[in-house]
Amino acid sequence: QVQLVESGGRLVQAGGSLRLSCAASGVAPSAYAMGWFRQAPGNEREFVAAINWSGSRTYFADSVKGRFTTSRDNAKATVLLQMNKLKPEDTAVYYCAAARDRPGWDHGNSREYDYWGQGTQVTVSS
């Protein structure tokens, strides 16, 4: 059974930093690309960041480029999202997701992902 569990979300002041973690079980980490999405109240789920199976390629939404980074440790089956210079508009529930590594993977499309975590709340106060 595949399980993704996010952690690290909390209340933080604008300008601060947070590191989210996603622990995967029931999957072979090297067979999956990983993505981060977020959803704020009243909004659709949106792409934040993604990383390919080896960690050699990362992708970011324009809104977080230069502020967020993502990395993975396949030996520990863990993916991290480091968020710096947080803004109130970053407030959302953050989800990690796993996509079977395949040619033509569209990292920004939520339909490309096969498994999802339950999410962790990030709140940025102004």
Image (cartoon, grey):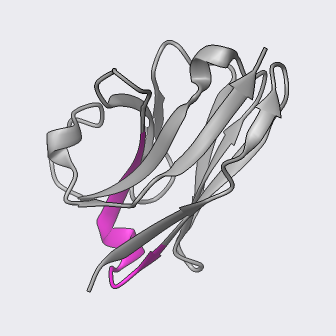
Residue 78 position, x and y percent, is 56, 68
Q: Position of residue 6 (x, y in %)?
A: 53, 61
x, y (%) of residue 116? 31, 59
- 121 vs 72, nearest the viewer: 121
Q: Is residue 52 visible?
A: no
Say whether residue 75 is magenta: no
- Residue 48, how many percent across, how many down? 46, 31
Residue range in magenta is 24-37
Residue 28 located left or right of residue 70: left
Position of the C terminus, as image quadrant, is top right
- On the question of residue 32 being in view, the answer is yes
Query: What residue is shown at x 43% (from left), y 52% (from top)?
Result: 96
Location of the N terminus (image quadrant): bottom left
In this figure, what is the number of numbered marks?
A: 0
With respect to residue 24, does 125 lie above or below?
A: above
Q: Residue at x 40, y 59 (%)?
A: 118
Residue 97 falls in image quadrant: bottom left
Residue at point 49%, 43% (across, down): 94
